[in-house]
Image: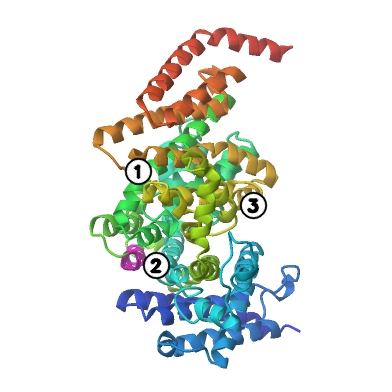
Amino acid sequence: METKNEKGLFPFSIMFIGIAWCLFQLYTAAFGVLPALQQRSIHLLFALVMIFLLFPFSVSNPINKDRFTVEKTLMVVLSLFATGYIAINHVEIWSLTGNLSIMQEIISFLIILLVLEATRRVVGWSLPIIAMIFIAYSYFGSYLPALFQHQGYTLSELFRHEVMGLEGIFGVALGVAATFVFLFILYAAILQVSGGGQIFIDLSTAVVGKIRGGPAKISVIASCLFGSISGSAVANTAGTGAFTIPLMKKTGYSKRFAASVEAVSSTGGQFMPPVMGSAAFLIAEVLSIPFWQVALGALIPGVLYYVAVFIMVDIEAVKNGIKGMEPKDIPSLRETFRKGWHLMLSPLTLVFLLLYLQWSPMKAAFWAIVITIISTFVNKNNRMTISQLFSSMKKGAVGSLETTIACACVGIVIGVINQTGLGFSISSILITLAGENLFLLLLLTMVVSLILGMGLPTVAAYLVLSVMVAPALVNLGVNPLAAHLFIFYFGIISAITPPVALASIVAAGIAEEKPLVTSLTSLKLGIPGFLLPFMFVLGPELILEGTAINIIISVITALFGIYSLAVAIQKYHIRPMRLWESLIFGISAVGLLYPGWLTDLVGISVIVFMSLYLWKTKNKVVSSINKSLAV
């Protein structure tokens, strides 16, 4: 029987653990991180404890969700024991030279089981199953066909590589989660609670609310602004979608289209610098290049993605006669700035610290958090109270659980890949299948990236793909940054790709629409996102690799190509288009998206010719359509 005391004790415990976790992360950000193994094990300790308290063993038994149980207590104790052992004995573990002791093998076994179970509860079955397959591959590798064969490793060797070191669970994946990724998630939570998230929406509303299709364009801009910081396409969909989707439905957009716009826009936030869902820093670390190089390289593709969505939203508004919002519902731009200018200080400071001063992501995120908290005291109407601060810290801690545990589980996969040399085998297989044909290799890589990225958080998806498929592209001569952005794009865009399509599913829930219908419409709106990676791989000028004149020409032709593709998808340009007319625009888009002056010239010429033809035949076709409707 649940007591009143337990009712109060459980939420207090979650709040206390969440705040303690945040304070630990902020302290290490301000005064220096602990030794890697110790920092990561303590971080995992907090994550496991919160997961086993918040997520019941069975989702079909929600009665135990908000109370202490014997099972939860046991899992928390095991988590404290196992990860605490690593944190306390990190020096001894780091200097291991011989075989593992019995205790160390028990600890290793426990941590692997705890990570797999915690991941199952938070992320679902897909990632733990993948991790278990890789564990089996490590153990039974000597029995496999020659293409995938390796010497095989004992359980003790597996434990040592996966747990007692920095190659597996406590490797790079958890390392980035335990340092700057957590801080950016916390920053997004504090910014949201402070009113900063609403400022993005208000600014977007003030700028585009009155123009045709305004609510959908608000979704595009607001999701772009907040999506880069939030670190999750799903979280961004839920956050901004709660406001934008009902607004789009109110002004005439269908439930299906409103949900799809929000899902596609929120997913694109992960492509936008400077933060890119925290993956920009990881890409820089993996490639050993400056962060600003990644951010600038990703800028043009990110902008092109949103230009494409914006155009398709505008065409939808024209086709359906959807106007802007009522003037009374649109906030004044001047008044919005007057009331909320101080809330823009931390995002602007973050960009300045990262791109101009080139501070480390951890240090920049720390000061962005501090400035956000201080800035709320400028205006008494949104001054953050202690209660709100604690609430945002808890929200940040809970929001980081999915990324943290996914990174720990992905560490198992990465550890096996490195231990067995599987990454080289997969790269060789992809190159062999493609016959050293770059375009075919890109198609194969796209399919693999979409499959492996399904249901994974941004950082986890990129990490898996960076060691499994990116090397194949680099080995065939693709620019390393372009190769890593390519797999990053397709790993992320799986959030709107059926059958998983988590962002589309969340948006469908808000819009009260069927998930599959929403996912298919999202896929249609997101087609430019499927073509952009091919564009910057085949034409690296779009990631700022080349001369200024070539970059400018590439951007201009890409804009023409994006527009041509958008009107082909929407079957509307000047007037409704027949199928054959849309196909011509689609072919023109492909020509413009493929680098080369001849294809660009032909593509632009086709657009000009078809535009003149459509304009000349506009009255005749529209009249014909009206007559058919009348009949």
Residue 621 visible, this angle: yes
Image coordinates of residue 193 in percent, x first then y, are 46, 62
**Above or below, comparing residue 7 to residue 555 in the picture:** below
- Which residue was labeled with disc 2? 180
Q: Which of marks 3 and 1 is nearer the N terminus?
A: 3
Q: Which of 110 and 505 is in front in this view?
A: 110
Q: From the viewer's perspective, is residue 265 above or below residue 89?
A: above
Tell me the kind of residue under disc 3: Val
Name the image quarter holding the N terminus: bottom right
Q: Mark 3 points at which residue?
A: 500
- SS at circle 2: helix
Where residue 521 sits, quadrant-wise, is: top right
Nearest to N terminus: mark 2 or mark 1? 2
In contact (CB < 8 Å): disc 3 and disc 1: no
Q: Which residue is drawn at 35% across and 65% down?
A: 365
Badge count: 3
Q: For marks 2 and 1, give the CA distance.
A: 25 Å
The answer to which of 335 and 89 lies nearer the viewer is 89
Q: What residue type is labelled 2?
A: Phe
Please give the residue where the numbered disc 1 appears in the rendered image: 543
Q: For the magenta stretch, what is the residue range?
A: 361-375
Would residue 369 be found to the left or right of residue 488 on screen?
A: left
Membership of 494 in magenta stretch: no
| Picture residue at 30% right of the left edge, 42% below the top | 545
Instruction: Give me the C-alpha separation between circle 3 and circle 2.
Output: 28 Å
* Residue 492: percent from left, percent from top: 51, 51
Name which quarter of the figure residue 94 lies in: bottom left
Q: Where does residue 17 sit, x and y in percent of width and height? A: 51, 80
Q: Is residue 329 visible?
A: no
Which residue sits at x=46%, y=15%? 611
